[in-house]
Structures are given as C-alpha cells and as structure tokens.
Image (cartoon, rainbow, N blue to C red):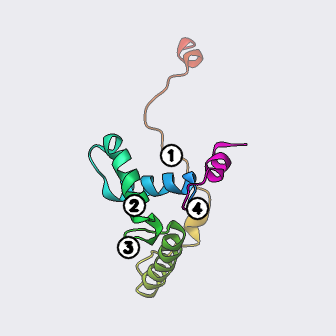
Amino acid sequence: MDIEDKLKSLKGPDGSNLYEHFANIIGKIVQDHPKNSYEIFEQYSHYIKQKKYNYTSNENYVDAYKLREKFAEVEDELDKCARYYNLIPKVDAEDEGEPAEPAQIGYVPDMLEELQL
C-alpha cells in the first residue's frame, strides 16, 4: 500500500480523509504565500477543519487543464491574425535547401606541405 492510498483510507469523524486535508492545506499555503508557512501549517490545518475549506472551490483556484486549453485557443487565434496581416515571413523555395558551408575564418597550415618547401 503506497502513501496516497494510506492517507485516503484514514478518515475523520466528518468523513473527510487525510489526503484531501493535506491537499487543502497545501492549496491554501500556495494561494496565500505566507512568509512563515512552516510555522503556520498547524493554524491552517485548524482553519480548514473548522471552515470546511476546499481550495478548488476558491475563486483564486486555476485548473491547469482548462488554462492549457484556453492558451491553445488564444495561440491559434494569434497565429491566424499573424498570417492574415502577413506578420509571419514566408520562406522562399531557394532557402529551403541545404545550408551553405560557412566560409573559412582562419588559416590552418598543413605541416607536411610546409616542411617540403
């Protein structure tokens, strides 16, 4: 049995499990950004237990999956606008080939040729 299952199996008198309680404490700490989170951890625990606080029902809670979907939609719209207004440079057919070999920067002597002189 791993830790997550063990924490979910430990239930309080009100039916909430220890896993959800820890998740709510950590969620509250992340949202509030207290300076002394280590010292205030127990106070947050009492607060959550008394108020039946749930971090996912808070207006500051952001679901990462919904956020990714929204940003993907926005990115698509921005791409469409950039194409419409010709903000994305078009690549010529000539430039798509293999890149040219860079020019020689310095002189590297061939020692065998230098010795035969």
User: Given contact means CB atoms under 8 Å apart, are the residues at marks 4 and 2 in contact?
Assistant: no
Q: Callout 3: helix, strand or loop?
A: loop
Residue sitting nearer the eye, 99 or 106: 99
Mark 3: few, some, or many residues within 10 Å (few <14, many ≥20)?
Answer: few
- First in residue order: circle 2 vs circle 3: 2
Q: Distance between the residues labelled 3 and 1?
A: 56 Å
Q: Callout 4: helix, strand or loop?
A: loop
User: Given contact means CB atoms under 8 Å apart, are the residues at marks 4 and 3 in contact?
Assistant: no
Which residue is tagged 4?
A: 15
Left or right, 71 with respect to 30, comes to right
Q: Callout 1: helix, strand or loop?
A: loop
Instruction: Look at label 1 and name its amino acid.
Output: Pro
Instruction: Look at label 4 and name its amino acid.
Output: Gly
Residue 17 position within the rendered picture, expressed as x and y whole percent measured from the top left: 58, 56
Q: Residue 50 carries which label?
A: 2
Which residue is tagged 3?
A: 59
Looking at the image, is mark 3 or mark 1 nearer the viewer? 3
Left or right, 6 with respect to 33, comes to right
Q: Distance between the residues labelled 1 and 4?
A: 71 Å
- First in residue order: circle 4 vs circle 3: 4
Instruction: Look at label 2 and name its amino acid.
Output: Gln
